Image: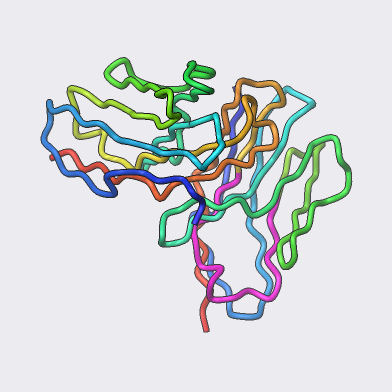
Amino acid sequence: DSGVTQTPKHLITATGQRVTLRCSPRSGDLSVYWYQQSLDQGLQFLIQYYNGEERAKGNILERFSAQQFPDLHSELNLSSLELGDSALYFCASSAFRDTNTGELFFGEGSRLTVL
Amino acid sequence: AQTVTQSQPEMSVQEAETVTLSCTYDTSESNYYLFWYKQPPSRQMILVIRQEAYKQQNATENRFSVNFQKAAKSFSLKISDSQLGDTAMYFCAFIQTGGGNKLTFGTGTQLKVEL
């Protein structure tokens, strides 16, 4: 158990809808990362927050947004969902602002299916 | 931009045998880290081993070792004495030192350990 908790584990919704994925990092970790894992593209970095502030941005669509709250949990909001958004969404956490060592602690992911 | 390539989508190995998973990467940077992550059926990503580019010595972690060839931009993972619990998807990943915290992953190699 990595200590990173993601909810929900599975989510099925329709095109055009909006969903929110939630992540609680390991106790004491200040950084939260979001990754998208789709079948054809592997793991893609979406965004990182450190202590409530956006730290780094990757290939995140404009329809997606994220935030990190004062209690350090994070939410990833996906709106105007399309079939292609179906994927496994991972949250990872680390104690540091910069993760040069690469040791991220991953949650078990939220499986999103858009019908 | 950095890219990570894993050219073996699937591999299988007999229990107790040795297997090597391949990874190549492309970067113009000289300071970076390379990683192998394991994703078992539970979906959680687990760090297996890490290599710092400035270190010539290949990293080892128990039954896992790497063959890091910096000039060739190659980073293979060797699993010795394979166990059934090693069955998983293995991802090679790269991060540039000071590069904004973006871990770039390969597309993965599905390893199956058979009796």
How many discs mark residues in the rendered view? Answer: 0
Residue B2's place in the image compared with B88, above or below, is: above
Q: Residue furthest bottom?
A: B115
User: Of residues A36 and A107, which is closer to you in this image?
Assistant: A107
* A52 on left or right of B17: left
Instruction: Look at 83% across and 51% down and name the residue there.
Output: B58
User: Of residues B25 and B48, which is closer to you in this image?
Assistant: B48
Question: How is the structure coloured here?
Answer: rainbow
* Camera sees residue A72: yes
* B50 on left or right of A27: right
- Say if the magenta span includes residue B78: yes
| The magenta segment | B76-92
Instruction: Look at 73% across and 31% down and name the residue there.
Output: B32
* B75 on left or right of B89: right
The quadrant of the rendering that contains the C terminus of chain A is: top left
- Say if the magenta span includes residue B66: no
Q: Position of residue A19 (x, y in %)?
A: 21, 31
* Camera sees residue B10: no
Q: Position of residue A26 (x, y in %)?
A: 51, 42
Q: Residue furthest front?
A: A71
Q: Position of residue A84 (x, y in %)?
A: 25, 33
Instruction: Give the quadrant of residue B18.
Output: bottom right
Instruction: Look at 55% across and 30% down and name the residue there.
Output: A30
User: Of residues B75 and B7, which is closer to you in this image?
Assistant: B75
Q: Position of residue A99 (x, y in %)?
A: 64, 31
